[in-house]
Image (cartoon, grey):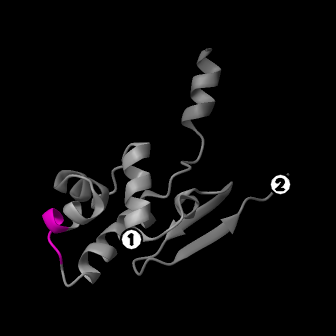
Amino acid sequence: MTYDTVLSMSQRQPIFNRRLFAFEVMQKRIAGNGKSCRQAAQESGVSPATISRCERGMAPDVETFLRLCRWIGAAPTRYILPETSQSVTDDGKTKTKTKQKD
């Protein structure tokens, strides 16, 4: 791998929407009568630390991600960003700007 390849990879937009995933993990936990991380972890099949990390915007491994998607009730593709500039507002709604082609 050349330096230019590594550099171009680092300049790409992230493909995983961490903010939306974090928001929805937290929303699912709180919607269940304000469950603790421990209760949510038991329900979802992951550790309490994993719930906490995901709520803080850290990306889980693939197996954990799929497990949490099942728990949330959302398709994993919901959290994959297309080649657009996408952001999540504080209320969990997604704003999208498409890239302009030259």
Q: Amino acid at mark 1?
A: Glu
| Marked residue nearer the N-terminal end (2 or 1) | 1
Query: Residue 40: which quarter of the image?
Result: bottom left
Question: Percent position (x, y) of residue 72?
Answer: 40, 69
Is residue 89 in the magenta section?
no
Q: What is the residue that sits farthest to the top in this orientation?
A: 2
Cα separation, mark 2 vs mark 1, equals 32 Å
Report helix, strand or loop for mark 1.
helix
Nearest the viewer among 102 and 80 is 80
* Residue to which mark 1 is pinned: 24
Query: Within the image, what quadrant is residue 26 found in?
Result: bottom left
Would you say 36 lies left or right of 27 here?
Answer: left
Q: Residue at x 51, y 52 (%)?
A: 16
> Is 91 placed above or below 85 here?
below
In percent of width and height, residue 70 lies at 43, 63
Q: Where 11 falls versus 66 (above or below)?
A: above
What residue is drawn where x is 17% and y is 56%? 48
Say what secondary structure mark 2 lies in.
Answer: loop
Q: Amino acid at mark 2?
A: Lys
Place of residue 43 in the rendered image (x, y in percent of width and height, measured from the top left) = 25, 65
Total tally of numbered discs in the picture:
2
- The magenta-colored residue range is 35-39
Query: Quadrant of residue 78 in the image?
Result: bottom right
Query: Depth check: 98 or 68 in front?
Result: 68
| Residue 101 in view here | yes
Can I make out residue 19 in this image?
no
Dot label at residue 101: 2
Most common secondary structure along the magenta stretch: helix
